[in-house]
Amino acid sequence: MILQFLKIFTEYVGIVLCLHKAAGKKLKINCYNLFDFVCYLILIFATENISFGRTVVYVYWLMYTRIRVSGTWKQVTKPFLTMMCTLPMLQILIYVASCEILTKIFNDYLVAIIINVIIILLIFIWKEKYLTALLNVITRFRKILIFILIFFLFKRLLSYFLEYSKIDAYFLDQLAICFLIVVLMFILWINSENEKRHKAEELRTYQLYTSTFEDAIAAIRMRQHEFDNHINAIRCMQYTIHDSEQLLEEQNKYCDKILQDNKYNKRLKLKTSPILIGYLYSKFTAASAHDIRVDYRIEDISIVHIEINDLIEIIGILFDNAVEALERQSDREIEVSLLETEGRLIVSVANRSEWKTNSEIEKFFDYGYSTKGEGHGIGLSRLDVLLKKYKAFLQVENISKNDVNYLCFKTELRDE
């Protein structure tokens, strides 16, 4: 009787400590603790021979968590599920690791008391960083751990059935708990994979935005330096040209040339996302510095249904591919269009090109294919992933303008 009482007491202490530890709250020792334990003790003996007794016990701990540990039902989930999964898992692992020794020396009650005491000690020295490390280990070796759990569960199920020719409710409870642990491992794995994808997306967005701002700053600095030179050139014209009419003519020509060179500046006045406008400005000026003419048609657009980082990446891939295609050509020209109509955002980038057959166009979508060789050509594969997110597709076709062929890449992003 005393051993049974100690078993129940140590189990109770372990559960209470685990609940408070999982909730991040300190356990306060007072008269309520004694009252709670007496209620639990009465409940254990009252439901000992009832088939659904364990279910009643689980309900007790759920109510205990709500009243003594957490303030709301929403806050109950974390500590309760942590306790329901952690304690049985620790019991199974400690039992499997020491059953050959403990069961030969002590009876069942003493073995249970020793296991409970070990669990209490583990909870006392437990810290949040240990939990993080444990979850990482579980996630990393989830397949091995699941196999071990299933193996020992099957082994114990078989031995128990061979010995007693039946399976009682207690063993079914253990089976349900092990199943819950396996489900938890799968949930942790899924959350870990989602977190990895989220972090990768954040890193890609950060790199994209950083590159955009750096390119825009470099372009503005270059323009500022050129602006100072242009002002000095205009001022000095009067010292080399004495005829007033000729001076006026030359100044007009010079100013027209400056306006032509800075034709992308008016894009900065658009009310669209400043990040997008800065990105386009830096791309256009960088292409112009490499003797590539960029004609564009860009209007104010409302892109609330499209993530700005996705739109920038889509435009960037198409534009970079067009620039890459023009490297070996003498006549370099790109046409960029960004228009919105009837809830559709139409993005198109076209570059001067030789006529491409359908088979040549299909090769563009092969992962790793590039005329520049290994290490290039993954842009359109990444673009395909982005477009699927918005249920869009890429249309590639040859178009003719003024008897000149252009290879046009076009997509429509719908507002759904």
Image (tube, grey):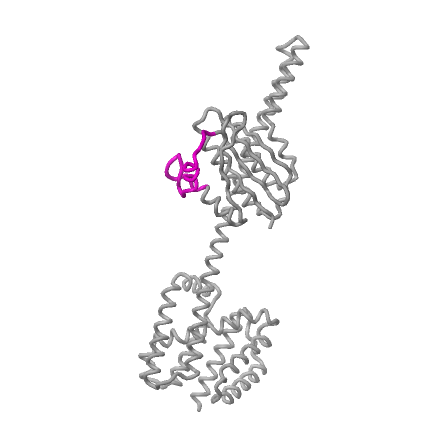
Magenta stretch, residue numbers: 353-379
The residue sitting at 52% across, 29% down in the picture is 400
For the point 33% across and 81% down, which residue is it? 159
The answer to whether residue 315 is above or below residue 190 is above
Q: Residue furthest right?
A: 244
> Magenta span: helix, strand or loop, mainly?
loop
| Residue at left offset 49%, top offset 82% | 54
* Front residue of this view, candidates 342 and 229: 342
Above or below residue 197? Residue 236 is above
* 125 over 314 or under it: above or below: below
State the residue lying farthest toward the top: 243
Among the 4 quarters of the image, the one containing residue 341: top right
Q: Quadrant of residue 121?
A: bottom left
Question: Picture coordinates of residue 366 (x, y %)?
Answer: 41, 42
| Farthest bottom residue in view | 1
Queried whether the magenta region covers residue 356, the answer comes back as yes
Given residues 202 and 409, the one toward you in this image is: 409
Q: Please state, as top left, top right, bottom left or bottom right, where the N terminus lies in the image.
A: bottom left
Residue located 49% across and 81% down the image: 12
Residue 47 screen position, x and y as percent: 50, 87
Indicate the position of residue 396 as horizontal and vertical percent values: 49, 38
- In the image, residue 179 lies at what x, y percent? 43, 72
